[in-house]
Image: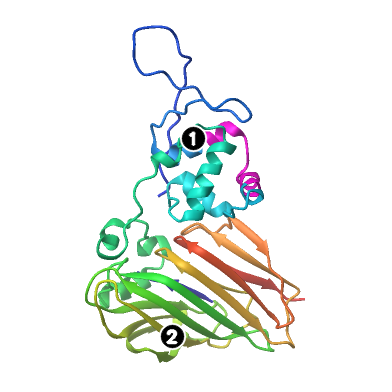
Amino acid sequence: MAAQQPQDAARLRLVGSHTERPGPPGPPGPTPATPGSPPGRLAPVGGFADTLHLAIEASGLSLDRIRAALAGRGVRVSVTTLSYWRRGRSQPERASSLRAVHLLEELLGLPHSALSSLLGPPRPRGRWAAAANTCHLGLEDVWPGEQEIANIFAELNAPPAGELERLSIHDSYYVDAERRGNLLRMRQVVRATVGGVGRCLVVHMADEEAAGCPEITAVRHGRLGRVRRRPEAGLIVGELMLDRPLGLGDSTVFEYEVEIPPGGPTTEYSRRFATPVREYVLQVHFDPAAVPAHCERYDREPGADVDHRREQLWIGASASAHVLAPDQQPGHIGIRWEWA
C-alpha cells in the first residue's frame, strides 16, 4: 500500500588551494582546513552547501561520526539533515541548527563564522513561500512511469504544488489477524501559502495482489469531491474539498480513512512526498494474533527503487511500530515487515 502527499541536490565544485606568497598587496589565498590543524581559510566560492561539503571531505569524517560528535555537545542533528545541508536541499534556520553550524566550524577546523556567515536569510513562508520554495517535485518524480495518475491530475486540473504547506501528516495503518492491511487513518494539518485554496488531491494505490482499488471514506473537516478509480491498477485519486477556502496564512485540519481491498499478506506501507513536511508520523498497528518477526523503516530518494536508509524498529507491547520524521523532505518513506 502506498500513498502520496500531492502537490536539487546542489551542484558541487571543487575549490583549489594555494599557499600564500609575498607579493603585491591583495587578498590572501586560501589554505584548506584539516582536522586537528590550526584553522585555515576555505574559499567561500560555492556558498554554505559547497563550503560544508568541502570541509567534510577534507576532514575525512563520516556523517555519522559528525552526528555523534554534535550529540556529545548536546546538539542532535540527524545524518539525513547533515546530508541535506551539504547538498543544498535545506539550510539551518532553527536556533538549535544554528548552534550546530558553529560546532561544525569548530569540529571541521574552520574559522569562526566560516559557515554561518554564508547562510542566507530564512526561507520565506506565508505570502512568498509558494513562489520561493523550489523544493518540490513534479508528478513524474513522485510516481515515475505512472501515466494514469498524470492523466487524472490533468483531468481534475490539479492545484499547483506548494499551495498548501504541510505542517503535519499522521498515518495510522492497520493490519488484521489475517496479516492483511485493511484500513488507513490519515490526518493532515496544512497552511495556505496563497489565498483562495479550497481543495487538494490525494492518491492511494493498493498492493499488487489486491482485488480492486482503495476507497476513501469518513472524511472529517472537509468533504470528498470528484473521485477517479482505476481498479485494474488498484488506484484511486480523490479530490478533498476543505471546510472553507483558505486565505493567505490560514490553516486547517482534515482527516479521512481509506478502506483497503482484500489481497494477500501485506508486508509494507509507505508514503511518497512531493513537497516538504514539517512533521511526518507513521504508525503501523498489528493484530496481537499476527505480529511480524521483523520490522524496519526505510527511506528512498525520489523515484528510486533502492533504499538509502534502513533502521530496525521495535514492535512494542501494543503490537505497533512507528516512525517520526521531522522536516521530511521530498522522497519516499515507509515501514516494511517480515512474517515468521
Q: Amino acid at mark 1?
A: His
Count of numbered circles on the image: 2
* Relative depth, front residue between 13 and 132: 132
Q: How far apart in space, not on screen, are marks 2 and 1 (Cα)?
A: 47 Å
Q: Amino acid at mark 2?
A: Glu
Residue displayed at 58% across by 58% down = 307
Please state the horizontal and vertical placement of residue 176, each as a whole percent of the image: 65, 88
Please state the horizontal and vertical placement of residue 90, each as a whole percent of the image: 43, 52
Magenta stretch holds residue 309: no
Please state the horizontal and vertical placement of residue 20, each as a whole percent of the image: 46, 13
Image quadrant where one finds the N terminus = bottom right
Do the CB atoms of the residues marked 2 and 1 lie less than 8 Å apart? Answer: no
Q: Quadrant of residue 221?
A: bottom left
In the rendered image, which residue does mark 2 sit on? 255
On residue 112, which mark appears? Answer: 1
Magenta stretch holds residue 60: yes
Magenta residues, as a range?
54-69
Judging from the image, what secondary structure is the residue with disc 2 in? strand
Q: Is residue 336 above or below residue 217?
A: above
Q: Quadrant of residue 314?
A: bottom right
Residue displayed at 25% across by 64% down = 127
Q: Is residue 322 above or below residue 20?
A: below
Residue 188 can be seen in this image: yes
* Relative depth, front residue between 310 and 231: 310
Image quadrant where one finds the C terminus = bottom right
